Amino acid sequence: MGTDLKRVRAYVEKHPKEVMTSLYHHVTDVDNLRLCFEMLDGNKATGIDGVTKKEYGSNLEENLASLSKRLKDMGYRPKDRRRTYIPKAGSDKGRPLAISSFEDKIVEMAVKRVLVEIYEPMFLECSYGYRDNRSPHQCIDAIGKTIQQKRINHVVEADIRSFFDRLNWAWLEKFLRHRIGDERLLRLIKRMLIAGIMEDGLTHASEEGAPQGSIVSPVLSNVYLHYALDLWFEKRVKPYARGEAHLFRFADDFLCAFQYKDEAESFERNLKDRLEGFNLEVAPEKTRRMEYGPFATENAKRRGERVSTFTFLGLTHYCGRARNGYFKVKRHTSIKKFRTKLRDYTAWIRKVRGEIPTAELMCRAKARIQGHLNYYAITDNFKWCEKYHYWFTRITYKWINRRSQRQSYNWKQFDQMLKSIGWPKVKVKVDLCPFRT
């Protein structure tokens, strides 16, 4: 029977300042490794060795026994990761990902499960990214309710430049040592970080950063920013503010809301020095302070200016009014995201329209638009979701009829096909009304 990680969390909650020295056996336990194997998705991309979950599982017990022995003997060495790229708005090359081999994913999952039990009770309420039972919608909801219900007049939106590439290993080790005293676990994490990246047949080594795509990187990033940003704001910024001061962070994107202008300006100035002390840099093109709140619209009009908006987690937040005339935080899909997603979808359907059967193509298209609506179909964004639905459907109709010289479908036939596959309709899926208590 595998070791019970829930006991780790219970111990952490009971002893919030104690350093834990016996953790590595959770990683090496065969039953826990087997559970990690079962948790992994077998349809994900493979690493440099090309081994799939099915292939690894064909001789599972021997493979796990061998892996456990190598971990116990400290003879385990992660393989180089395979570099790949996924589309990224504003980048021609895309966002770089490092794909681990399947066996390395098992170990990464085992380490992640240990770290989550240790640090999840410690993370602050302001942190929403990469955490169980937390989502972008909850972060957005908290922002709306805070601005709506508190005395908020100024907002600072910020972004850390290339955070995952610049995460400093020495600082990360110091942060981990606040709670982890098991040298073997710390050494294993270090080995994961220093594993090379293979691209175009060449292996590149790095001396800093956490590879995006690694299972363990998200929790390591949260540990890093917990100490570098969250605790600083909670212990050094918020207690000394005369008025309201609130932080909302999702991964390396964060937003701060203040009651007074001078405190927002002071935070903006001090933020740069604070992050530079941890080898991080604020992206100036994505960082700005603005007036935002119940009086922002009237003040902007009096100055002859347009009222400010901010974009966070793919949504543009703007000052609006409820039906009863009171101030309300409203949101709509970011124009940049709107255009990028339609452009990416057009490129995809142009490429695959002649390669896969119509039924499969339409099922994939349905999954894409459903995924968009699951995220963006929120309170006050119905109009923009309808607009996206309109153009997405017409792009699909256009390119499905360009697979040959003869038109495949007219609109009546196409509508019948949409009905038969259950083409999604636009309706609000997430209630983010800031008046809700």
Image (cartoon, rainbow, N blue to C red):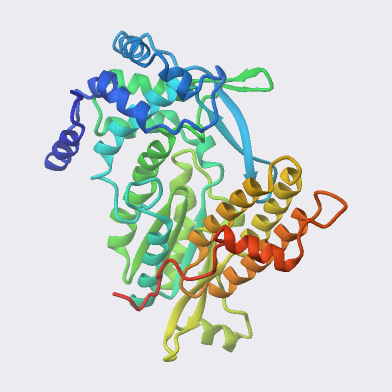
Q: Quadrant of residue 200?
A: top right
Whether 434 is drawn above or below 91: the answer is: below
Tell me, yes or no, if residue 195 can be seen here.
yes
- Asked whether 187 or 28 is in front, the reply is 28
Count of number-bearing discs:
0
Q: Going 60% across and 49% down the picture, which residue do you hit?
A: 364
Whether 229 is drawn above or below 208: the answer is: below
Q: Tell me where residue 117 appears, x and y as whole percent.
A: 25, 37
Q: Going 40% across and 69% down the picture, which residue do you hit?
A: 258
- Asked whether 149 or 396 is in front, the reply is 396
- Asked whether 32 or 153 is in front, the reply is 32
Q: Tell me where residue 108 appears, x and y as whole percent.
A: 39, 27
Tell me, yes or no, if residue 17 can be seen here.
no
Q: Tell me where residue 6 appears, x and y as whole percent.
A: 18, 36
- Residue farthest to the left, as pictured: 14
- Residue farthest to the right, as pictured: 405
Whether 178 is drawn above or below 53: the answer is: below
Q: Quadrant of the N terminus?
A: top left
Q: Quadrant of the C terminus?
A: bottom left
- Asked whether 50 or 419 is in front, the reply is 419
Q: Tell me where residue 50 appears, x and y as whole percent.
A: 56, 20
Whether 306 is drawn above or below 82: the answer is: below
Q: Quadrant of residue 392?
A: bottom right
